[in-house]
Image (cartoon, rainbow, N blue to C red):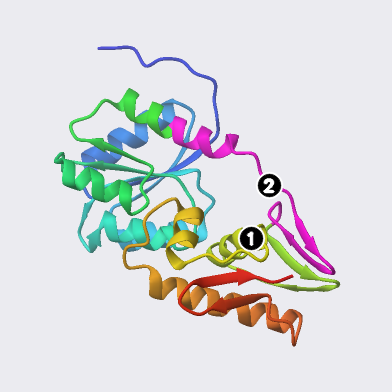
Amino acid sequence: MKETPKVEVVYLRVLIVDDDRTVLEDNREYFEKMGYETVCADTAGAAEEIINSAALDCVILDIDLPDGNGFELCARVRERTGLPIVFLSGYTEEQSRIRGLSIGGDDYVCKPYSLEELELRVRARIKSGQNAQPPGPIQYGNLMINPGNRSVCLGEKSADFSTFEFDVLYFLARHPGEVFSYEQIYNQVWKAPINKGIKSLQVIIGRIRQKLLELCPGHEYIQTVRRKGYLFVP
């Protein structure tokens, strides 16, 4: 049997989602030997609850789950966070791989698979996210948008923005006066085609507008350009 390579303990937390108990335990055991903290789930519902409440560095996601499928879960997660997602599936055909990547998956590993390769792919995705240089805060008058702590403040007042809302606001605020379509916003923020996400994006932009108006009544920071899209007006 090939000896498990020794590596420095990294203390990264990975969520492993699979309804196959053997796969779940094999992955958990290997990743813990490699120095990771692991959290496991065997249903989409349990996985989504963990994602919404726990600090994670990556998700290893099966597609066939008892109460749903990994594609749908990935799409919902992408509406809230850029958390790395690596699909692990017995569906090996090109169409499934393309679908997984197009809805927001960061990688796709086919079963049967090498535990060593899976860990290396997970590590690479986590490292890629960590190496991204965090952009600096943006200030227009008293309005401060700070990606460091993901805060939006106007003087002494502040408002809570979800991950999805903050990412859209920050993108638009970085390009004041430029008009962006739904497709451009979605592609730039989530690096994926919009598919059926237009309605969700409309709702999110509506929430952003409402929160900004509560911070600064009378000033419409995000404006609509008919048939073209949205722009940020300082």
**Which quadrant holds the C terminus?**
bottom right
Per the image, the residue denoted by label 2 is 135
In magenta, the rendered stretch is 123-149
| Residue 49 in the image, given as x and y percentages of width and height | 42, 62
Residue at (67% x, 57% y) in the render? 174
Of residue 114 and residue 200, the one placed in the foreground of this image is 200
Q: Residue furthest bottom?
A: 218
For label 1, the crowd category at 10 Å Cα-Cα, with few meaning under 14, some 14 to 19 and many 20 or more, is many
Secondary structure category for the residue under label 1: helix
Examine the structure image and report whether residue 195 is included in the region drawn in magenta. Answer: no
- Disc number at residue 170? 1
| Residue 36 in the image, given as x and y percentages of width and height | 48, 33
- Disc number at residue 138? none
| Residue 190 in the image, given as x and y percentages of width and height | 46, 54
Q: Amino acid at mark 2?
A: Pro
Q: Amino acid at mark 1?
A: Tyr
Residue at (51% x, 60% y) in the render? 53
**Which quadrant holds the N terminus?**
top left
- Are circles 1 and 2 on residues that touch, CB within 8 Å? yes
Tally of numbered tags: 2
Does residue 28 appear left or right of residue 58 in this picture? left
The relative height of residue 150 versus residue 84 in the rendered view (above or below) is: below
For label 2, the crowd category at 10 Å Cα-Cα, with few meaning under 14, some 14 to 19 and many 20 or more, is few
In primary-sequence order, the first of circles 1 and 2 is 2
Residue at (28% x, 41% y) in the render? 24
